[in-house]
Image: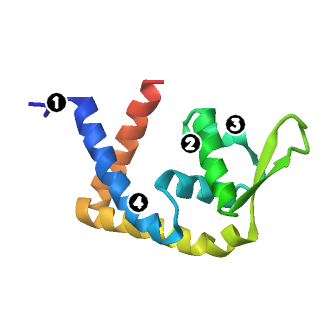
Amino acid sequence: MFDHCLYFNTAALARRLEREWAAAFRPFDLTPPQAFMLRMVLDQPGLLQREIADQLTIARPTATRALDGLEAKGLVERRVSETDGRELAIHPRPKAVAMKAALNEASGAVTTRLKRLLGAGQFNETVSKVRGVRSALR
């Protein structure tokens, strides 16, 4: 009935992928959104909250809630930006830095498994096409 419905098929795919990454990040006591955000902060320390929201294409209040959770777990800290005292820069705490490699490995393992199931070409093509649709709908 919904074979040609973009909404139904992408929503179903999103739910399935959410379960995959939730299982991968469960040992870290992180949700997938928290884990991806933390990986970004680890790779780009000092990002402003608005930059994180923009790069993850999420609303700023959503980013704030995820950062609140990461801060409560002792993984990130907010500091007044050196360039604009009205903004907060996000920095990883030592606990987060210590788990960076394992966090990246867990995410990489999911990607490797999906590439094996789908084939690397189809995986890469699908990601590219979904990214293109997402960009076109902005």
Disc 4 and disc 3: Cα gap in Å?
25 Å
Give amino acid for label 3: Arg
**Which secondary structure, mark 4?**
helix
At x 35%, y 60%, the residue is 20
Residue 120 at x, y = what percent?
Answer: 32, 60
Q: Earlier in the sequence, mark 2 or mark 1?
A: 1
Q: Is disc 3 surrounded by few (<14), some (14 to 19) or many (20+) residues within 10 Å? A: some
Q: What residue type is labelled 4?
A: Ala
Q: Which of 41 and 124 is in front in this view?
A: 41
Helix or strand or loop: what does disc 1 sit on?
A: loop
- Give the vertical position of 17 relative to 74 (above or below): above
Q: Residue furthest front?
A: 72
Label 4 Cα neighbours within 10 Å, binned few <14 / some 14-19 / many ≥20:
some
Q: Distance between the residues labelled 1 and 4?
A: 28 Å
Image quarter of the N terminus? top left
What residue is shown at x 67% (from left), y 61% (from top)? 42
Query: Looking at the image, is mark 4 or mark 2 nearer the viewer?
Result: 4
23 left or right, relative to 66: left
Tell which circle, 4 or 3, labels the residue nearer the N-terminal end: 4
The residue lying at 67 percent from left, 57 percent from top is 72
Q: How crowded is mark 2: few (under 14 residues within 10 Å), some or many (20 or more)?
A: some
Q: How many marks?
A: 4
**Residue 22 image label:** 4
Check disc 2 and report the residue beneath it.
56
Secondary structure at numbered mark 2:
helix
Q: In terms of depth relative to the viewer, which is nearer, 119 or 36?
A: 36
Q: Splitting the image into 4 quarters, where does residue 23 fall?
A: bottom left
Q: Which of marks 1 and 4 is nearer the N terminus?
A: 1
What SS does tag 3 mark? helix
